[in-house]
Amino acid sequence: MSDTIEKIKCLIIGSGPAGYTAAIYAARADLKPVMYTGMQMGGQLTTTTEVDNFPGYPNGTDGTAMMEDMKNQAERFGTEVRFGLVTKIEFSKEVGGIHKITVDESKVIEAETVIISTGATAKYLGLESEQRLIGGGVSACATCDGFFYRKQDVVVVGAGDTAAEEATYLSNICNKVTLLVRKDFMRASKAMQHRVDKTANIEVKYNTEIDEVLGDNVVVGVRAVNNKTSKKEVIDVTGVFIAIGHIPNTNIFKGQLEMDEVGYLITKGKSTKTNLPGVFASGDVQDNEYRQAVTAAGTGCMAALDAERYLGSLD
């Protein structure tokens, strides 16, 4: 472990839309932010081939390019962006206290404020064909990518409220939506189930799972299997939407920061303040409802402003 302890005003953990926006605002406020990107520089958005709904891109862009634009903007104002993973963190409980962070199990940093933008990871089925076709027709966000499948046939996998919401959302865009439910019932609320049942172009297949996603470079269908009868069928679709939940990337903060039962960080009121002074959370790590790039960016702005005001209150 390094003997040199670096001291900084503002540490940003994570490099998605929330992290980069926080960096832009923190840098402009002269907080001299240092960002550690995590192992997936740019976050979840780098797995999205096309982004058509983020303001400022009238002709659309792709996720990787957009994250590179955000990174360049943050660096232009003085953010130091570093590739690395926070492996240990000890938060102070005192107002004005110093937070101790270890990066890559070796470098130690002391920060006056910490902005957590580590995001959430979508759950996938784990099939080789599914993973290979992420960005080629496989998605975990209907509101992000559904537009590209308008007037086409798609499959949604899941049984909860999220799956029902995504299926009904896609039904307004797509020709037909097939909802695959692993058990013989849905876990979604009755209201959401009624909405699915009343939508003419949604077909629900119970006791059904995906055996394989079909296609070389883009999705051309799925092979589904009935887990009761073992009967297999091919469903011709161009899009596959996995809606089985997300896992917030918060394991490293357990026991120190308040979380809900799933693991999302809890922030106070309309702010990004956590239960500890000088520690702020933005983006999908504290948002289990919207999970959009533009809302994540908004909370990144809020976190930087909250951090600036916190430091100002100490003077």
Image: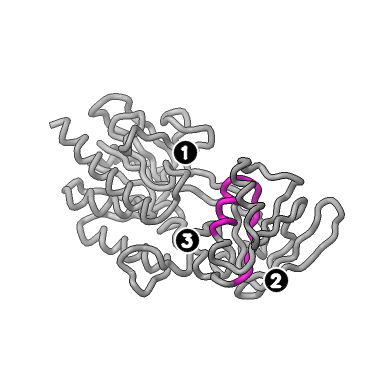
Quarter of the image where the N terminus is located: top left
| First along the sequence among labels 1 and 3 | 3
Q: Which residues are magenta?
A: 152-169
**Residue 164 image label:** none
Please report the residue visible at 40 percent of the width from the left and 43 percent of the height from the top: 106
Q: Which mark is residue 264?
A: 1
Closer to the observer: label 1 or label 3? 3
Secondary structure beneath dot 2 equals: loop
Image quarter for residue 275?
A: top left
Is residue 253 shown left or right of residue 97? Answer: right
**Sequence-earlier tag: 1 or 2:** 2
Q: Is residue 83 left or right of residue 226?
A: left
Crowding at mark 2 (Cα within 10 Å: few <14, some 14-19, many 20+): some
Identified by mark 3, the residue type is Cys
Q: What's under tag 2, amino acid-wise?
A: Asp
Residue 74 colored magenta? no
Sequence-wise, the earlier of marks 2 and 3 is 3
Determine if residue 257 is in view. Answer: yes
Which marked residue is nearer to the observer: mark 1 or mark 2? 2
Residue 250: percent from left, percent from top = 47, 40
Residue 236, disc: 2
Q: Residues within 10 Å of mark 1 (few under 14, many from 20)?
A: many
For label 3, the SS is helix
For this orientation, the residue located farthest to the top is 94
